[in-house]
Image (cartoon, rainbow, N blue to C red):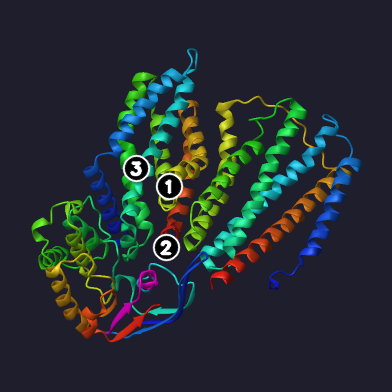
Amino acid sequence: MTYFADVRALARKDMLLELRARDTLPAMLLFVVATFAVFHFALPERSSHLAASGLLWVAILFTALLGLGRAFVPEREQHVLDGLVLAPCDRSAIWLGKGIATLAFLGAAELVALPVFALFFHGVDAATIGAVALADVGICAVGTFLGAMAVATRARDLLLPLLFLPLAIPIVVGGVGASVVSSPGRYLGFLVLYDTLFALLCWATFEYVVTE
Amino acid sequence: MTVPRLYRVPLPALAAASLVLVTTALALVFFVAPNDADQGFSQRIFYFHVSVAFTAYACFAGGAWKALLHLWKRDPRADLESYVAIHQGLIFGSLVLVTGSIWAKISWGHWWLWSEDQLVLFLVLFLFYAAYFMLRFSVDPGPQRANFSAVYALFGIVLVPVSFLAIRIAKSFIHPIVFTRHGPNFGGWILAAYCVSQAALLVLAYTLYRIELSGKRIDLRLRELRTA
Amino acid sequence: MIRARKLGKRFGEKRVLRGVDLDLEQGGFAVVTGPNGSGKTTLLRICAGLALPSEGELEVDVPRAAVGYLAHEPLVYRELSALENLELYGRLYHVPERRERTGMLLERFGLWDVRHERVASYSRGMTQRLALCRVLLHDPQLLVLDEPYTALDTAGAELLDAQLAELHRERTLLVATHDPDRVAPLATTRLALA
């Protein structure tokens, strides 16, 4: 299907851009490790094991925000978005391609972040990893979408966290729940629900974000 | 200059109806409905708290509906209507937080209760819809701003049930202090007081919506005429 | 191919276009002139399909895939090479024989030797030539060009002259320019915006 060929071409382009610039991914890696260090000092001595789990999710969220803020910058700065919008492909492919690339970067950052977290605080179980994977999908779907809007406004990077955080609260609930509770099924299921609903909404409405 | 009549119910009639309903509601709530067994007189704010919450949901839903009309049918009036509806929703949403907080202080001695699902939900929605306004003010007027606002309004209405569910399931690991409360037994005057307050607030919200809408429309028309 | 009646465009309160009529038949060449700020770019964007008119009617008989739009900005990624940019657009437009066509265009516009270098390292004139390659890559039926001669040196301008003359025979062109005399011999319709 040509739709997926278009998505692949666009995702490939985004990965290529990041490989050339080599700034977003290293920044995300450094940021997440620095955040863990800050957490160590921010958690008073007798804080529970659980507090650290909660903070893992805070770190993931803000590291993602760092990457998401940069996602559509080349398109807007150089007005290339017009070129992509003119192309005969479905406009949602632009969102999906960019989202997939961002997901890859976030995943790459977490490949380092999770072991470092295990080193600094405590081990990470399968449920947590599953929750991180599911949460990443939701974060990238919604974050990429909002990033496209934010970058077209005057406030730019001021606006993205404001738009994103209320929508991210359910993701945090799902993620922390799955990490902390003994039967995480309910929370993982909730994350699947969130991802499905919002990815569908993003896919259906991205057209209107880039056209008049 | 006359503004074309767009709605069937004229504004003065709405305003009069609001006045009558709100007065009746206040009378019923404060003088007629019996005291609550547990909490006494202070519980009465609950009639307004619940009604205001439902009214806020109705405003957000109305805003989302108008947003859908804007995107789908390209209705030229829908953007402004969506914006005003969400504005009303945010105002009533703030009232939910205020009345809820007052009720919590009077009943339990705390200004904020994480155990109150409705209150927490409105905190999230308040944050979300406040960001709506930041978004709107950060884009120059035009088709792009209308599209962004409409899409964001749709995200909002999907967020309402999702957040509510999230808040419910979060309780297993957050363990807030839960205060038991007996629900009102909906009999006789209590039911009447509640229904009238709800109706009063819905009509009031709609009246305010129409007032703000006509004000903004006139303003817009004036500016268009100036630059024509 | 393009039929516009009483086209108007406003952004909020600012009115940019008013009461524009345009008729461009297939194979025609329309030249749009006017001082800065007269709405030439807005008109071209509307005809290319990037913007919707606020008032009036517009009929454009070609699908999106058959329109080629040259904007003020080159619409290419500065951090990618010419080849990578054209590769992307070639895929998005499903250009048949993509590699051959890309190579042919790069050679024609004198960019073959720098095809692997980042666009950020190009001069303004070279970037404009790449933009022209991008526009022509998918062999569009309708070409909408916004001041195509910008930044081109004499050689580049002559290349473009030849290209336009060749295209004029089989394609439809809508060109906005500050220098109408250059394209005057080819023009079939003129539109002057106030």
Distance CA(mark 2)–CA(mark 3):
24 Å
Residue shown at 56%/38% (left/top)?
Answer: B166
Query: Per the image, is C33 magenta?
Result: yes
Residue shown at 53%/53% (left/top)?
Answer: B136
Residue shown at 27%/39% (left/top)?
Answer: A23
Within 10 Å of disc 2 (Cα), the crowding (few <14, some 14-19, many 20+) is some
Q: Which residue is mark 2?
A: A211
Helix or strand or loop: what does disc 2 sit on? loop
Name the disc covering residue A103, or none.
3
Which mark is first along the chain, 1 or 3? 3
Residue B9, picture quadrant: bottom right
- The magenta span reads C28-45
Report the quarter where the C terminus of chain B lies: bottom right
Q: Relative to C147, is C58 on the left or the right?
A: right
Residue shown at 73%/31% (left/top)?
Answer: B104
Tell me if I can see residue B188 in this picture. Answer: no
Name the disc covering residue A156, or none.
1
